[in-house]
């Protein structure tokens, strides 16, 4: 059990790790050296915390979390390590410095504390040279990825000397508390992800130069079509920093034996060095391969011309191969005859061959290697799964034409029929000996993809499906892109009570495996209907949503919403309608409807009011909940984490938060089962709302904002409607409580009035086209 | 010869009474002087030119046609003089930028003048029409130097323009273009290839011809994304605008064709001709679309012009020609027979023509006014809305008004009987002349695809908003008025059909483009008929104060005829659309 943590080294990674520990609710000491002649001996750690608070995307999940980081220095505060269960070293990548530090730390460590290094380039064996016997069994490498809050991979490198309990305790903490996926890696240079990833980047740079591709062209090929981050390689380097590239390359090259194919892909790249010299270190600097030129007053997107080394206006890649990929996927791209196709073949053939050849060296487990690339490099598929999807015979043929040696393990996989295979509804991976073994999921991990492997849906349509999770719990899955909600989703949601009764289930979890729980209503369908004036269809959608959400809330079984990623608008209203929420820590929730010119129309106004009124922690009296809801909805506030959502009242005090994405479904299921015992549906809320007098008061507040020039013309129209809904309409009065249904009728009417305005339709159109709200 | 009187009163009524020209167009920047006091006399002047100069040349132009001799094209007798008079009158640059010697008058006025020209002499109108399109493209996509050099001479009519898209292997599908353009190292390009069917590619009306040519650069990506636009003058031009040597462009011959004999349809050979890039490299489609959109509206007006002449000719004939007796008893017992206009079936034909032509004119002028707002209105939001409306209506007008041109020419022929089939009355020429407008500038089938495939999804239906929302507001405003109830009732029914069809096509077409393709032509017609019903209802609103006068009665009668005898076709169209792609796509190609 890890109760307290210390991080030594307050650089970007150290501070980021400390922040994530703090996010998990654990106190963490952040120590660094005392700068020469410093007045404040804790300056480095303090500065790091200040920087964390300003970083975007935010390393802290709430402001409060920052207070759990205790800054200090290694001269004065080593005694603080005495009650730490885990100490992470994140100092400069020099073995001598690290080893000296370990020796200094040792006397201060708790007897069973674990010490780990976050090194990315130094082998475990080197770090352990000359290490104290006792420390050797509780020392390991925990290699995080940047930024630590958001990247889910942590590579764990241990050896025979390591006490498995020490290793498991830290791995378990990383897994459950920090939400990372610990992947065991052998003590080989670059471990798993960087070994494959750096090779891929070098190959991608070298062959782009050799084949004469533009930066844009290379990135269009080496990005989305293969499920790599859409930045492609040059865009990715801008993100990680151009200055890191030569450093990472050199350290990997130094560590790898001469026989390693990595050396063949290292091409000199003087342009990159020149850019770094001129301060073009990437997005953290003045720009990198891409930059925004603000010289002429406006912001001109520019790109480096790889041949000339100068900036020129950015242009969209126009390649037949990339067009072909849009219809025919990666396979079509690899067949294309243009330079895009040649580039793809050169890089993909080499990268996959290299990765396949690493099986047995960096790890025996292909599923682990794949996971490392997914979680550490944001590849949609790891190299083995990617190879399977391209067809192993095709890959082998491609290696032939590219003149790349065929790894023996690829031949074995061809013989066996793939690196993965599904059997009896279970995913199996190819072991080194050519047999298949099940891909094991840790205890407490339930993946919908596994449920899908072993069973058919109980019901499904184009946008949603219902699955049986076992033990009497059903899963309602929104399958549409970004989890958008349309008539199909609402239809199946409405059918849930029937399905539950039919199957004798005891509870429902609303969950999906995708990156977004739900971005809200399908605006495209609504906008089209509005544009042709099909108002009845829109009204039916609003009413249908209200009915479906209420049906969930008042059904005779518990409903647990389990969001991860976006839960906006109609998605957030599901959280409010559910009996309980089990949220992934990385949940971004908010009632953002005003951004598209409408008010929450699926019960969001009514339920947020009810929630604020019932919350004992919030100010009492009839005005306070209305004012709070008006602010929350009127400013379209979005919570940047589940904790913030809780502070905003979008999650209720009894709701749960899960850090590890893979554990979310199991936790939600457990919650549903807990609620199912003796379950009684909630009573519909009655609300005391101020009516016209309250509306006038909100109007004054608005007039104030207006005077300060903070309201646009259409903001005024939308917030006025919102005020009307939240204060209960014309007939409301403190003394006469109104029902939830009354408020929902007001929501509907206000929604329908707003959706007929030009301002609202322009907002919706703008959001669909640009993904950003329009201020009109 | 066909009968044609320029419909000046009708045009004036549409502009000033139905569409509110004075409050919609005149307040736009730069148009302060272009009020009724200028527009009416200008229309009269144009009408006179059309009636007195162009109309008399129409028959001879058809019979004589263009001649190709030694690489030179001779236009029919009288065309050169007529063209000179046209240019001297300042009509060539009517709506072009005054900064480059154009008259800077509203498009709305230009549309009305074009209609009269096309009514009088369709073949003639193609020459200045193409110049106007070329000027538009240069205006929007050319460099300042190009504009300064070429625009004034297009505006004055000294030079004319063409658009060179079509090649033997490449008609509708411009991605197949083979004409090549290679940089010549001096900032210009060397253009080589063969274009066919080029209207006005060579002629003797003007000193120089500016060809706007679609071609591919050496590194061009495949398909339409790799097309660039080049300006290739017939005679190269010095910096001062003086003509220098002949460029490597020559006419290889002209087509023998069904109609518009006085318009030369040329095969053009470009042999390392000097060309100048217009717009960006590979940006040719964008630049050409500017030209094509303007040209599509111009072709729509060709249809309208021919339809008007056909209608006038048929009415004149039906009032004179005596055959049979009215079914209700002789109308003119003193004569040997009644004029055929007494017969219900002849009236059906005449009213079918007239009620559609009048509504089509309202739509054309309306779109012209929105085009003016799209370019001139000070409020950018309003400009965008106007632009959306024009973008939506362009394929609808191109296809429907050219269909109407052919339909009316043929109906007129039916009214004239055998006398329509022989040459004397000029109706058979109208049939032949009108037909091409359904084919060039993107066949009408392609217009329908543009509507369902491009215009519907654009901005998730944003363009449709510019039609449906004001239409619904119009119905709401007037449905309580008992005088208008028959109009609004019928209009509403059609609007609901159109709305339903739109939603269905959008929904089905999203997952299956063939569904949208199979419905496209029926959908475009449904749209057009509904829009024309709206035009009629607007007309009736405008004419209500004069409901007691003959003019008012006439308009109400025409609207009533349209609503009850033409508009019900929307029911059939709706059913056809709802039938889906199954009946269209079921049969294997071999089984045909
Ligand atoms: C008198 C005359 C003047 C002309 N003037 C000019 C000019 O000035 N400049 C110039 O560039 N061209 C000009 N043209 C050419 C004219 O624009 C083309 O003929 C026209 O674009 C159609 O091309 P096509 O004849 O090759 O027919 P095709 O493209 O072969 O089409 C044949 C048929 O197939 C249909 N079709 C084709 N593709 C599709 C599709 N994707 N979906 C559905 N249906 C399809 C068409 O609608 C048509 O019905 C002129 C032609 C004539 C006859």
Image: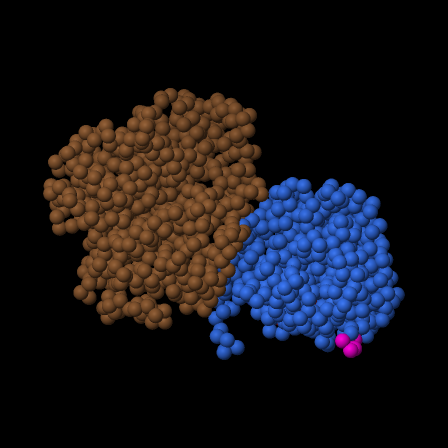
Chain colours: A brown, B blue
How many numbered marks are there? Answer: 0
Rendered residue at 32%/38% (across/down): A11
Question: Is A664 left, or right, of B480 in this rendering?
Answer: left
Question: Residue A652 or B555: which is nearer the viewer?
Answer: A652
Question: Is residue A625 shown left or right of residue A668?
Answer: right
The quadrant in which the N terminus of chain A is found is top left
Tell me the quadrant of the picture where the C terminus of chain A can be found: top right
At a point 21% along the width and 33% down the height, the residue shown is A4
Q: Quadrant of ligand 1?
A: bottom right
Question: x%, y% of residue A260?
Answer: 28, 61
Residue A648, quarter of the rendered image: top left
Q: Residue at x 73, y 42 (%)?
A: B29
Q: Which residues are magenta?
A: B67-71
Residue A688 lies in quadrant: top left
Q: Is residue B205 above or below residue A63?
A: below
Q: Nearer the viewer, residue B74 or A554?
A: B74
Q: Decide which of B416, A522 is in the foreground and name it.
A: A522
The residue closer to the viewer here, B562 or B486, is B562
The percent position of residue A153, horizontal first and vertical second, equals 28, 48
Which residue in the rendered view is the most extreme toward the right? B334
Q: Is residue A24 magenta?
A: no
Q: Is residue B404 found left or right of B467 in the rendered image?
A: right
Q: Position of residue B329 (x, y in %)?
A: 79, 64
Residue B144 rendering spot, x and y as whole percentages:
70, 52
Residue B68 belongs to magenta span:
yes
Q: Quadrant of residue B127?
A: bottom right
- The answer to whether residue B219 is seen in the rendering is yes
Q: Main secondary structure of the magenta part?
A: strand
């Amino acid at each position: 059990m890890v109760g307290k943590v210390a991080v030594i080294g307050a650089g970007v990674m150290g501070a980021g790790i400390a922040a994530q520990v703090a996010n998990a609710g654990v106190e963490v000491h952040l120590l660094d050296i005392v700068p020469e002649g410093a007045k404040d001996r804790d300056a480095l750690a303090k500065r790091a915390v200040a920087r964390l608070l300003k970083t975007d995307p935010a390393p802290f999940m709430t402001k409060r979390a920052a207070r759990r980081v205790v800054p200090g220095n290694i001269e004065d505060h080593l005694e603080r390590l005495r009650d730490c269960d885990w100490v992470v070293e994140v100092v400069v990548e020099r073995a001598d410095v690290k080893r000296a530090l370990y020796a200094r730390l040792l006397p201060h460590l708790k007897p069973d504390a674990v010490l780990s290094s976050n090194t990315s380039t130094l082998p475990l064996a080197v770090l352990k040279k000359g290490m104290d016997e006792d420390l050797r069994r509780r020392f390991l490498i925990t290699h995080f990825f940047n930024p630590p809050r958001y990247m889910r991979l942590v590579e764990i490198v241990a050896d025979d000397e390591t006490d498995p309990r020490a290793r498991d305790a830290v791995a378990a903490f990383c897994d459950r508390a920090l939400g990372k996926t610990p992947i065991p890696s052998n003590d080989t240079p670059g471990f798993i992800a960087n070994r494959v990833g750096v090779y891929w980047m070098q190959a991608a740079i070298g062959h782009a130069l050799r084949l004469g591709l533009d930066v844009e062209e290379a990135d269009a090929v080496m990005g989305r079509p293969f499920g790599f981050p859409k930045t492609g390689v040059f865009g990715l380097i801008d993100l990680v920093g151009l200055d890191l590239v030569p450093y990472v390359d050199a350290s990997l090259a130094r560590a790898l034996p001469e026989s390693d194919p990595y050396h063949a892909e290292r091409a000199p790249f003087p342009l990159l060095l020149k850019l770094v010299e001129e301060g073009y270190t990437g997005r953290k600097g003045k720009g990198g391969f891409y930059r925004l030129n603000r010289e002429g007053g406006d912001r001109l997107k520019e790109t480096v011309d790889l041949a000339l080394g100068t900036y020129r206006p950015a242009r969209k890649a126009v390649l037949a191969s990339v067009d072909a990929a849009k219809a025919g996927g990666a396979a079509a791209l690899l067949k294309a005859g243009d330079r895009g196709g040649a580039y793809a073949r050169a890089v993909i053939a080499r990268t996959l061959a290299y990765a396949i050849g690493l099986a047995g060296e960096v790890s025996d487990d292909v599923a682990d290697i794949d996971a490392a690339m997914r979680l550490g490099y944001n590849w949609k598929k790891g190299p083995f799964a990617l190879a399977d999807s391209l067809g192993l015979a095709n890959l082998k043929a491609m290696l032939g034409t590219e003149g790349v040696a065929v790894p023996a393990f690829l031949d074995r996989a061809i013989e066996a029929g793939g690196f993965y295979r599904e059997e009896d509804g279970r995913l199996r991976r190819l072991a080194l000996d050519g047999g298949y073994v099940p891909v094991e999921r840790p205890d407490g991990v339930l993946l919908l993809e596994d449920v899908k492997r072993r069973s058919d849906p109980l019901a499904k349509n184009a946008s949603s499906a219902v699955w049986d999770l076992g033990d009497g719990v059903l899963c309602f899955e929104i399958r549409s892109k970004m989890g958008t909600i349309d008539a199909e989703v609402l239809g199946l949601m409405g059918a849930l009570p029937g399905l539950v009764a039919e199957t004798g289930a005891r509870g429902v979890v609303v969950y999906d495996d995708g990156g977004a729980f739900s971005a809200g209503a399908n605006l495209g369908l609504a906008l089209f209907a509005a544009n042709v004036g099909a108002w009845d269809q829109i009204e039916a959608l609003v009413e249908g949503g209200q009915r479906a959400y209420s049906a969930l809330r008042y059904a005779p079984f518990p409903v647990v919403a389990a969001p991860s990623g976006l839960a906006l608008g109609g998605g957030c209203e599901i959280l409010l309608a559910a009996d309980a929420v089990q949220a992934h820590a990385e949940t971004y929730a908010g009632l953002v409807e005003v951004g598209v010119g409408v008010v929450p129309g699926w019960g969001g106004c009514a339920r947020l009011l009810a929630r604020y009124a019932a919350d004992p922690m919030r100010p009492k009296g009839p005005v306070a909940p209305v004012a709070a809801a008006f602010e929350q909805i009127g400013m379209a506030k979005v919570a940047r984490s589940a904790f913030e959502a809780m502070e905003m009242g979008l999650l209720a005090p009894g709701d749960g938060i899960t850090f590890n994405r893979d554990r979310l479904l199991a936790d939600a299921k457990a919650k549903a089962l807990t609620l199912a015992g003796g379950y009684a549906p909630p009573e519909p809320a009655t609300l005391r709302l101020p009516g016209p007098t309250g509306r006038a008061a909100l109007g004054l507040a608005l007039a104030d904002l207006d005077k300060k020039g903070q309201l646009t013309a259409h903001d005024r129209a939308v917030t006025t409607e919102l005020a009307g809904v939240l204060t209960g309409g014309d007939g409301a009065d403190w003394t006469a409580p109104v029902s939830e249904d009354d408020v929902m009728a007001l929501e509907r009417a206000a929604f329908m009035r707003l959706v007929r305005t030009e301002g609202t339709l322009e907002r919706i159109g703008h959001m669909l086209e640009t993904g950003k709200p329009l201020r009109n | 010869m066909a009968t044609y009187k320029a419909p000046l009163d009708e045009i004036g009524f549409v502009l000033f009474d139905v569409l509110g020209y004075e409050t919609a167009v005149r307040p736009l920047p730069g148009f302060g002087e272009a009020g009724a006091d200028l527009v009416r006399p200008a229309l009269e002047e144009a009408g006179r030119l059309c009636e007195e100069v162009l109309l008399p040349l129409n028959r001879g132009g058809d019979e004589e046609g263009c001649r190709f001799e030694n690489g030179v094209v001779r236009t029919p007798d009288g065309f050169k003089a007529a063209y000179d008079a046209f240019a001297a009158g300042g009509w060539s640059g009517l709506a072009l930028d005054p900064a480059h010697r154009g008259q800077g008058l509203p498009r709305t006025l230009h549309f009305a003048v074009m209609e009269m020209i096309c009514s009088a002499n369709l073949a003639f109108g193609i020459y200045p029409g193409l110049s106007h399109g070329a000027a538009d493209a240069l205006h929007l996509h050319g460099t300042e130097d190009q504009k300064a050099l070429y625009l004034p001479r297009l505006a004055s009519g000294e030079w004319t323009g063409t658009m060179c898209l079509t090649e033997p292997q490449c008609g509708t599908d411009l991605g197949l273009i083979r004409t090549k353009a290679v940089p010549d190292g001096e900032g210009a390009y060397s253009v080589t290839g063969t274009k066919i069917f080029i209207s006005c590619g060579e002629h003797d009306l003007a000193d120089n011809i500016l060809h706007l040519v679609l071609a591919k650069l050496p590194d061009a990506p495949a398909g339409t994304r790799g097309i660039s636009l080049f300006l290739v003058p017939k005679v190269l031009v010095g910096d001062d605008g003086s003509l220098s040597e002949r460029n490597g462009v020559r006419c290889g011959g002209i087509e023998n064709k069904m109609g518009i004999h006085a318009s030369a349809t040329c095969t053009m050979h470009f042999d390392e001709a000097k060309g100048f890039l217009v717009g960006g490299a590979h940006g040719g489609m964008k630049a050409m679309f500017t030209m094509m959109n303007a040209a599509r509206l111009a072709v729509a007006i060709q249809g309208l012009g021919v339809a008007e002449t056909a209608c006038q000719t048929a009415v004149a004939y039906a009032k004179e020609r005596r055959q049979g007796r009215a079914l209700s008893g002789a109308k003119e017992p003193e004569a040997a027979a009644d004029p055929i206009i007494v017969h219900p079936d002849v009236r059906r034909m005449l009213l079918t023509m007239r009620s559609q032509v009048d509504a089509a004119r309202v739509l054309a002028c309306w779109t012209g006014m929105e085009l003016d707002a799209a370019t001139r209105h000070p409020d950018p939001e309003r400009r965008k809305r106007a632009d959306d409306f024009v973008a939506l209506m362009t394929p609808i007008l191109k296809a429907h008004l050219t269909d109407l041109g052919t339909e009316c020419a043929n109906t007129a022929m039916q009214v004239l009987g055998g006398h329509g089939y022989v040459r004397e009355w000029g109706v058979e020429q109208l049939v032949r002349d009108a037909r091409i407008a359904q084919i060039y500038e993107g066949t009408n089938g392609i217009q329908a695809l543009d509507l369902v495939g491009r215009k519907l999804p654009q901005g998730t239906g944003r363009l449709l908003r510019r039609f449906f929302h004001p239409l619904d507001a119009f119905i709401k405003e007037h449905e309580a008025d008992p005088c208008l109830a028959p109009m609004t009732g019928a209009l509403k029914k059609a609007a609901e059909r159109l709305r339903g069809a739109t939603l269905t096509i959008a929904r089905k077409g999203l997952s299956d483009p063939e569904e949208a393709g199979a419905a496209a032509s029926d959908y475009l017609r449904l749209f057009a008929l509904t829009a024309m019903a709206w035009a009629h209802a607007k007309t009736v609103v405008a004419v209500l104060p004069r409901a007691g006068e003959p003019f008012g009665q006439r308009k109400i009668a025409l609207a009533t005829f349209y609503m009850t005898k033409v508009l019900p076709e929307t029911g059939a169209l709706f059913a056809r659309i709802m039938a889906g792609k199954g009946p269209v796509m079921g049969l294997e190609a071999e089984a045909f």
